[in-house]
Image: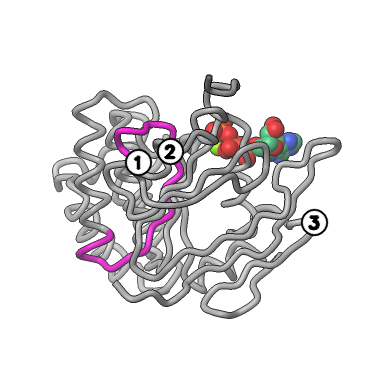
């Protein structure tokens, strides 16, 4: 793993009326790593991804991707630069088939629909969706398949950096293990750097090289999973009380 910086966020701030969702957050994502991003509800995790990917314009600070200032640029521009994400709230593609949903992702980089469809098919198989499911409508697939199709759609945009926002929420333990294996494979075999936002500690601690912790819009701490797990500040943030 090289230690080249892929993404650098400097003093990022975002307010919604009286709420400061991000308060001077500075952090880096290194090329090749799986970075876990954790923190209690409302910590600012999704807002961070929304600011990086151009969904929201930050009120202050900078976002640098491969050294280029992309702060406040449009989502399409940022996707073309190579940052993709999946969504915390499932965005159902009810009336699209599985293959159509992923082809839509591949069409970011080509106008050739047939080529995009071939790429989509390869990626779907890579994440473990069999060909027999390709023509099934989004409204007829299981939650885990939905998560895998959304992951495949994001991969089809050929990102250098991919954010997963609570990709295992709502899944059963054995399904969480399936996703963990796929995510590690995406990182190792496709060479995609990952920012994994997660509440399921067993999952995020297992797959991450490094963890950053957000709390009330601030960066609370960062480190190796084992260090972060036993950090009293982190325990306090989650329990909302000082340990005795
Ligand atoms: N579009 C918005 N309008 C108003 N407030 C918002 C908006 N988006 C986020 N917030 C607020 O900003 C704060 C941070 O929210 P955010 O969704 O980033 O937290 P989170 O860490 O992703 O939490 P969770 O783990 O529950 O998903 C919260 O107080 C939230 O209510
Ligand atoms: Mg969130």
- Residue 156 - label: none
Question: Which one is in front, 205 or 169?
Answer: 205
Q: Secondary structure at mark 3?
A: loop
Query: Residue 75, how many percent across, how many down?
Result: 60, 62
At x 69%, y 53%, the residue is: 56
230 drawn magenta: no
Range of magenta residues: 187-204
Q: Please give the residue where the numbered disc 3 appears in the rendered image.
A: 59
Question: Which one is in front, 228 or 9?
Answer: 228
**Circle 1: is it few (<14), some (14-19), or many (20+) Cα within 10 Å?**
many
115 is higher (above) or lower (below) than 44: below
**Which of disc 1 and disc 2 is earlier in sequence?**
2
At x 49%, y 49%, the residue is: 212
Which residue is situated farthest in the bottom direction here? 67
Q: Quadrant of the N terminus?
A: bottom left
Query: Residue 34, how many percent across, how many down?
Result: 35, 56
Residue 40 lies left or right of residue 62; in this view the side is left
Labelled pair 2, 1 in contact (Cβ < 8 Å)? yes
Q: Please give the residue where the numbered disc 2 appears in the rendered image.
A: 198
201 drawn magenta: yes
At x 79%, y 45%, the residue is: 15
Q: Secondary structure at mark 1?
A: helix
- Residue 204 - label: 1
Q: CA distance from mark 2 to mark 1?
A: 6 Å
Front label number (3 vs 1): 1
**Which of disc 1 and disc 3 is earlier in sequence?**
3
């Amino acid at each position: 793993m090289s230690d080249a910086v892929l993404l650098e966020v400097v003093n990022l701030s975002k307010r919604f009326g009286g709420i400061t969702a991000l308060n001077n957050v500075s952090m880096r994502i290194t090329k090749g790593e799986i970075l876990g991003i954790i923190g209690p509800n409302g910590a600012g995790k999704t807002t961070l991804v929304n600011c990086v990917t151009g969904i929201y314009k930050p009120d202050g600070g900078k976002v640098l991707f491969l050294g280029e200032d992309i702060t406040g640029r449009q989502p399409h521009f940022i996707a073309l630069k190579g940052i993709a994400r999946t969504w915390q709230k499932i965005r159902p593609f009810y009336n699209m088939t599985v293959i159509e949903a992923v082809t839509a992702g591949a069409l970011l980089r080509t106008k050739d629909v047939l080529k995009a469809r071939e790429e989509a098919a390869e990626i779907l198989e890579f994440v473990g969706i069999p060909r027999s499911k390709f023509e099934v409508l989004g409204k007829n697939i299981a939650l885990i398949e939905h998560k895998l199709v959304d992951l495949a759609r994001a991969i089809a945009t050929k990102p250098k950096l991919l954010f997963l926002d609570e990709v295992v929420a709502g899944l059963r333990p054995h399904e969480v293990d399936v996703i963990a294996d796929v995510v590690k494979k995406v990182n190792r075999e496709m060479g995609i750097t990952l920012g994994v936002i997660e509440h399921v500690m067993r999952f995020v601690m297992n797959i991450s090289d490094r963890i950053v912790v957000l709390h009330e819009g601030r960066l609370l701490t960062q480190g190796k999973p084992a260090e972060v797990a036993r950090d009293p500040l982190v325990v306090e943030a989650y329990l909302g009380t000082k340990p005795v």
